[in-house]
Image (cartoon, helix red, strand yellow):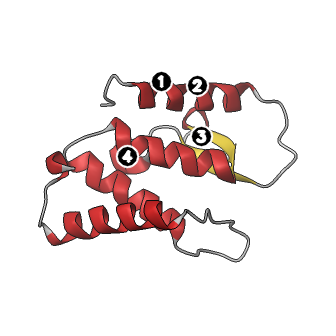
């Protein structure tokens, strides 16, 4: 499912370190190791607690780890992380170049101007 690239290795490293962490003293978010949209479940062995920063980075890496229709799913998940959710959720504030790049790619994918394989 995941491409054999450096992003997959980085993702795996973050997940492994978070999995063996005994306590997390700062704000954290629950993360599906294999995203539900890619066939992951809500079972305990597919969940890990991440800091807000780790969570954002993992979703950014997931975009670089997949292709085809899975890319659109991961682009959407990353975009949703930038949209305000519940009041208790912290959101990453990307710089203007990152925001523009993500927004343009996601918009083109949604409109069908480009396919996931073109990104």
* Picture coordinates of residue 48, whole percent (x, y): 64, 39
Mark 4 packing: few (<14 Cα in 10 Å), some, or many (20+)? some
Q: How far, Cα to Cα, is label 4 from label 2? A: 16 Å
Query: Alpha carbon of mark 1 to alpha carbon of mark 3: how far?
Result: 18 Å
Q: Mark 4 highlights which residue?
A: 63
Q: Which mark is residue 13?
A: 2
Pick whichever of labels 4 and 2 is earlier in the sequence. Answer: 2
Which comes before the other along the chain, label 1 or label 3?
Answer: 1
Where residue 14 appears, x then y in whole percent?
Answer: 61, 31
Determine whether, in the image, residue 1 is placed left or right of residue 88: left
- How far from the left and from the top, in percent, is residue 13? 58, 25
Foreground residue among 93 and 111? 93
Circle 1: is it few (<14), some (14-19), or many (20+) Cα within 10 Å?
A: some
Q: Which residue: 68% across, 44% down?
A: 50
Distance of mark 4 from mark 3, alpha carbons?
19 Å
**Left or right of 28 on screen, residue 78:** left
């Amino acid at each position: 499912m995941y491409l054999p690239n450096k992003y997959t290795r980085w993702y795996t490293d973050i997940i492994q370190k978070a999995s063996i962490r005994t306590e997390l003293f700062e704000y954290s978010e629950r993360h599906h190791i294999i995203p539900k949209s890619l066939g992951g479940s809500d079972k305990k062995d597919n969940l890990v607690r991440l800091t807000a920063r780790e969570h954002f980075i993992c979703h950014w890496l997931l975009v670089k780890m997949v292709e085809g229709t899975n890319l659109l799913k991961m682009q959407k998940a990353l975009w949703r992380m930038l949209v305000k959710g519940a009041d208790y959720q912290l959101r990453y504030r990307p710089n203007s170049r990152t925001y523009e790049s993500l927004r343009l790619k996601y918009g083109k994918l949604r409109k069908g101007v480009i396919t996931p394989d073109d990104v």
